[in-house]
Amino acid sequence: MSLLERTDRGAAVHLTLNSPDNLNALSDAMIAALRSAFDTLSADVRIRVIVLKGAGKAFCAGHDLKEMTAARVAKDGGAEYFADLFARCATVMQAIPRLPQTVIAEVHGVATAAGCRLVASCDLAIAAENARFGVNGVNIGLFCSTPMVALSRNVPRKHAFEMLSTGQFINAHRASEIGLINRAAPPESLAGETDALANLIAGKSLSALRIGKRAFCEQIEIPLEAAYEHTGNAMVRNMLDRDAVEGISAFLEKRKPDWD
């Protein structure tokens, strides 16, 4: 049984966190599996969309607390291990916006702490109406400082800090209201709605999606004037691309475009 199961569906890949006994926790092995999968997919020109989901009762329950506790026996109390763990996890989270593909989180059950960060790191997210989200480390004396990075870049600061400081869970409808997810779906419709979104995006120009995602993620981190200059350059590259020539021609000729 693979810790991270891959299923290809045309131009979309479904990656399933497959460790239900620990609620798909981001163990050392799971982090390594995700990093390896992302490295492989980043070079796969056939794939336009990646769907992340979890097996069993949960999407992802965050870091593996048993592994973290076991590291405390070291002479430094686990400091070196913890620093390495958080750095490795941050590398995986930062890989998601750098992937050329659109990444969609399909969330059921709970997404807590670093699992909630995984949702926030994805480009898009659809959740079952009964899903719950929390950055609840404060409840066990560990403020979710690294999950805070992705969370605070998705939701308004006061909502983010309320979640972080209270440790309370929010439901899918509230997560949609504050922008953590795109929308909630009935549990029985979750897979279908995710597939519909994935297929819609997969039908677009691969080169346009790659150029656009990169420009989106880069411009959002820089000042307004620089963002316009940066995205203007991106549009020039896009206009010169074969798919833009084909797409515009197809529109003017009232036919379906033939993407590469």
Image (tube, rainbow, N blue to C red):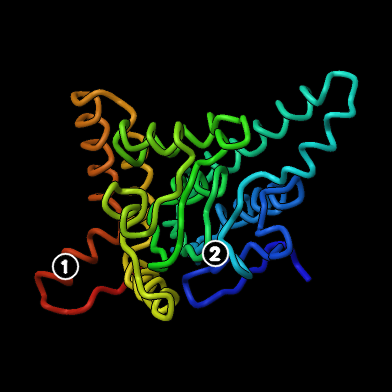
Q: Is residue 66 left or right of residue 154?
A: right
The C terminus sits in image quarter: bottom left
Badge 2 element: strand
Q: Considering only vertical position in the picture, is 64 above or below 106?
A: above
Q: Which residue is mark 1?
A: 249
Residue at 50%, 61% (x, y): give it. 45
Q: Is residue 183 left or right of residue 65?
A: left
Residue 80 at x, y percent in the picture: 78, 23
Q: Is residue 41 left or right of residue 192?
A: right
> 162 or 220: nearer the eye?
162
Residue 205 at x, y percent in the picture: 33, 63
Badge 2 or badge 1: first in the primary sequence: 2
The N terminus sits in image quarter: bottom right
> 89 or 218: nearer the eye?
89
Q: Which residue is mark 2?
A: 53
Residue 7 at x, y percent in the picture: 60, 74
Q: Amino acid at mark 1?
A: Ser
